[in-house]
Amino acid sequence: ELANSFFNIGFPNGNTYHGRNFVIEHFSHDSLRNPKSLNVSFRTQISVDQNRNVKVSKSLCILSMVCYRDDDDVRRILPDFGNTLGNVLFVSCHAERADTNLNIFVEENLKWAVFCFRGTEFESLRDFISSLMVSLAPFEDFQNAHVWQEYSDQLDNLPDFDTVFHVPGIGGQPAEYADTVFELIQILNNRNCKIYYTGHSLGGGLATLFCAKMLARYQIRPHALVTFGATAVGDLGFKNWFDKQRITSWRFVHSNE
């Protein structure tokens, strides 16, 4: 439903994206030149040069939708997208205390990796409170930038993987092993793997803040941050810091949101 809502694509093999109105907010230097063009159809707004980004965004939207399934369902569903995604390694990270769910999809030859955060499930009280963004806290060591405390705490307390993640040896490089999200993302970055962050709703907000934290702490710059109906992350100071980083960042929302 999420994928159909944003892209009007079939599940799982759709190949069209039309018939909906969208606002595409580029947080960084890719801002739209003509604000009056925002509420036009997705097809007419996207130029031919951006078509590759559209296809990538469609795949990330599908993964954001898959993120709402449990791990066994995800493993069962992934082969259905073989024509779109290829062979994918999968690992998940679930923080039961914080109700944070992160699914990580890594192309088997390390061409790309997607860090996908699950959105709000309102049967979870903690999810509901998180989506309300209760209080602000300083962002890393930047005194003039503040982010939602609950979001930051969730990301800082991501647990170790249940099983060690095996990063295959490619191009003469030896295999490596990661126990945590932070170890894995550094290994992938060192292997020149294209890193994407994505998520829907609350998951989009978490993906945005995770992207910012990885850049501030480890200087890991993603290939792109693509979110769908993402919640706000922080204050104007954070926005200004984020804009200066010139991250390729697309935030998709319905035109009446």
Image (tube, rainbow, N blue to C red):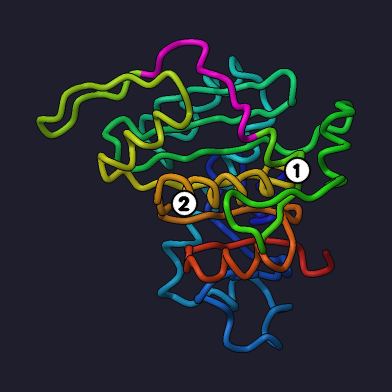
Q: Residues within 10 Å of mark 2 (few under 14, many from 20)?
A: some
Residue at 75% across, 56% down: 232
Residue furthest left in the image = 172
Q: Quadrant of residue 223?
A: bottom left
Q: Nearer the viewer, residue 44 or 101?
A: 101
Q: Which residue is mark 1?
A: 149
Q: Is residue 89 left or right of residue 109?
A: right
Mark 1 vs mark 2: which is more N-terminal?
Answer: 1
Position of residue 248 relative to residue 165, above or below, is: below
Position of residue 20 relative to residue 59, above or below, is: below
Residue at 57% across, 78% down: 31
Residue at 54% across, 23% down: 92
Q: Residues within 10 Å of mark 1 (few under 14, many from 20)?
A: some
Type of residue at label 2?
A: Leu
Q: Nearer the viewer, residue 146 or 96?
A: 146
Give the secondary structure at mark 2: helix
Q: Position of residue 64 (x, y in %)?
A: 62, 41
Q: Position of residue 138 (x, y in %)?
A: 69, 51
Give the secondary structure at mark 1: helix
Magenta stretch in the rendered image: 155-165
Residue at 71% across, 41% down: 151
Position of residue 52 relative to residue 161, above or below, is: below
Position of residue 76 relative to residue 45, above or below, is: above
Q: Nearer the viewer, residue 206 or 80?
A: 206
Q: Which residue is mark 2?
A: 215
Q: Is residue 247 left or right of residue 238?
A: left
